[in-house]
């Protein structure tokens, strides 16, 4: 699994994305409110020291949005990615997955650009995929898709909703994807 993850990271870096490293701990506002979605299984810390770090991340894209929001002064285009663990509560169980999130921000970032990134990653592993229309509050309606490989839903991709951009204080468009590497590894 580690060799596979390293290969994916190497591919993404080769595409010109800067790798970031952010804390696994975050908060529900960043995970859900700022991203315009409902809680889908947060693992919360009972005796947290700071509200900023009161939950374990359930997905990585909010971390990338936070980095972009703190780097508005940096030259565009900004192309960043992060691979890491996420945890989500499913009933009484807590499931752990490796994921990679990839985001690009510049005046012309769009669905096509981020889909090309996904296409290249999956082609490197000889995989074909389908994309189904879906709704996701973090993305613009009609500019978001759910990625399916061999019948398994493994990613979301699209253009970030302007409401989400505003919540993060961003003025430049962002296109992003989040890919479940644990699921992809099982498929391969």
Image (cartoon, rainbow, N blue to C red):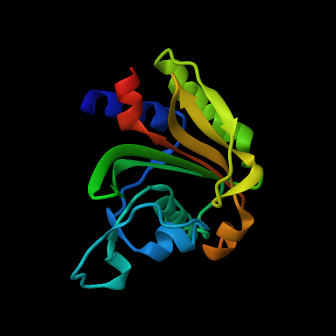
| Above or below 167: residue 108 | above
Location of residue 120 by image quarter? top right
Q: Quadrant of the C terminus?
A: top left
Q: Position of residue 145 (x, y in %)?
A: 66, 41
Q: Position of residue 125 (x, y in %)?
A: 46, 19
**37 left or right of 83 in image:** right
Residue nearest the observer in this picture, 117 or 56: 56
Visible in this render: residue 70? no
Location of residue 51 by image quarter? bottom left
| Above or below 137: residue 155 | above
**97 left or right of 138 in image:** left
Q: Position of residue 6 (x, y in %)?
A: 33, 33
Residue nearest the observer in this picture, 76 or 28: 28
Q: Quadrant of the N terminus?
A: top left
| Above or below 181: residue 37 | below
**32 left or right of 2 in image:** right
Task: Please give the name of the residue rendered at 52% of the width and 26% of the height, measured from the top-left corner.
Answer: 151
Task: Please give the name of the residue rendered at 50% of the width and 14% of the height, measured from the top-left corner.
Answer: 126
Task: Please give the name of the residue rendered at 58% of the width and 35% of the height, measured from the top-left corner.
Answer: 147
């Amino acid at each position: 699994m580690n060799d596979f993850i390293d290969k994916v990271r190497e591919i993404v870096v080769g595409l010109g994305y800067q790798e970031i490293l952010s804390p696994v701990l975050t908060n529900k506002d960043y995970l859900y409110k700022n991203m315009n979605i409902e809680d889908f299984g947060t693992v919360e810390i009972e005796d947290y020291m700071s509200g900023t770090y009161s939950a374990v991340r359930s997905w990585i894209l909010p971390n990338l949005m936070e980095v972009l929001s703190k780097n508005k002064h940096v030259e565009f285009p900004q192309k960043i990615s992060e691979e890491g663990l996420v945890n989500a509560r499913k009933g009484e169980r807590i499931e752990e997955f490796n994921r990679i999130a990839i985001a690009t921000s510049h005046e012309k970032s769009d669905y096509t650009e981020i889909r090309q990134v996904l296409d290249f990653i999956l082609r490197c592993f000889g995989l074909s995929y389908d994309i189904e229309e879906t709704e996701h509050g973090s993305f613009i309606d009609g500019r978001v898709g759910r990625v399916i490989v061999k019948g398994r839903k493994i990613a979301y991709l699209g253009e970030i909703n302007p409401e989400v951009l505003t919540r993060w204080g961003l003025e430049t468009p962002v296109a992003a994807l989040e890919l479940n590497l644990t699921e992809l590894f099982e498929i391969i």
